[in-house]
Amino acid sequence: MKIQELAKKFICVSVDQMPLLYGNDAVRAEERTFFKRVIDQITGEWAHESRQGTYVVTPSGKLLEARALTKIGWQKMERPKEVLQLMEQGLEQWGKMAPAERRRDPGLKLPVEANNDWDKFYPADGLVLRMTCRDLPRKEGDWNQVLWGEAVWENLDYAWFRRNEANQWIPSSIATGATFEVSPVLVERLVRFHMLDNVRCVSAKHFRKGDVQKAQLTGKVLEVRGNNVSLRYEGTSRAERLDPKVGLETNMLGRAIFNVASGRFTSFELIAVGNRWGTQETRESVNPSPLGFIFVLVPALDPRDHAPPRFLALEQDYWK
């Protein structure tokens, strides 16, 4: 409650920091300049290439307080007491500033309103899936189990398919018993950009096109009842990159209901379970360890689920 009350004295902003770090679009150039101005004031060595954190800043970009992903500060980032202290200290410093210091930098032309360009790309008439990835039970003595104890870690992302792509998740001729192959391009999108080891921290790299060794998903019409078509999916995936060596192999199983009258899915669930291996930013285990993903349908009108896919902002070939 203290944090909620104190938050009324702030303009609270939540932003995906990855496009600000790695994006190159001209639309958000000033935002990137502002963000860089803020993070450059952080002292200490960063624990990761991410710049996650909670920052208290002035409109000109002067950093007042922060709890960021540095090697000595990352454990404080999400502790309520630390966040409360951060806000109190930030307000105290703000109160000591002269009025002129509080004003915006006139040389930095930041947008007056929040810039959410991704809404115009949101496929409201297509297929949007919320992806959750999580660790699965491990063997005793596994490096990850030793480090993280009994905690269950998971992370989220969203997969977008335009209307013409959503139609490729159903057969061209609908009849009970009909089988078909889901477009390899769409399955490969899931494998390259979404079926990644994001459990502990969002992966900074995805699989390249040449890294995908298998991305196959077969569909079958189980039943046609009126306008509703019940579908089953089954398939496998395998991808591996070598810089550094990181790989993932899964078995996939899913089910869905498609309404031919509306041209939309009314339910969709796809599970992928398998093993990951190799070393990356948040893992140092070289032994295969189990990992799971579930993709579920997102209601088109729920703005809470309009977050763009993680790599849509960074990669030009997401839609390809």
Image (cartoon, helix red, strand yellow):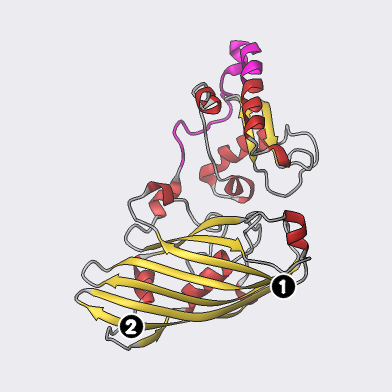
Circle 1 residues within 10 Å: few <14, some 14–19, many ≥20:
some
Q: Is residue 94 magenta?
A: yes
Principal SS element in the magenta part? loop
Residue 60 position in % (x across, y down): 60, 25
Residue at the disc numbered 2: 221
Q: What label sits on residue 130 in the rendered view?
A: none
First-in-chain label (1 vs 2):
2
Task: Report the amino acid beneath label 1.
Answer: Pro
Nearest the eye: 5 or 246:
5
Tell me the residue at 65%/66% (across/down). 137
State the extent of the magenta-drawn residues as a range: 91-115
Nearest the eye: 81 or 199:
81
Residue 225 position in % (x across, y down): 22, 78
Residue 176 relative to residue 287: left or right? left
Name the element at disc 2. strand
Residue 81 position in % (x across, y down): 65, 30
Calculate the distance from the C-alpha at mark 1 to the C-alpha at mark 2: 35 Å
Residue 229 relative to residue 127: left or right? left
Q: Is residue 112 above or below residue 187?
A: above
Q: Is residue 71 above or below residue 299?
A: above
Residue 145, quarter of picture? bottom right
Residue at the disc numbered 1: 288
Nearest the eye: 122 or 89:
89
Tell me the residue at 25%/80% (across/down). 224
Name the element at disc 1. loop
Task: Report the amino acid beneath label 2.
Answer: Val
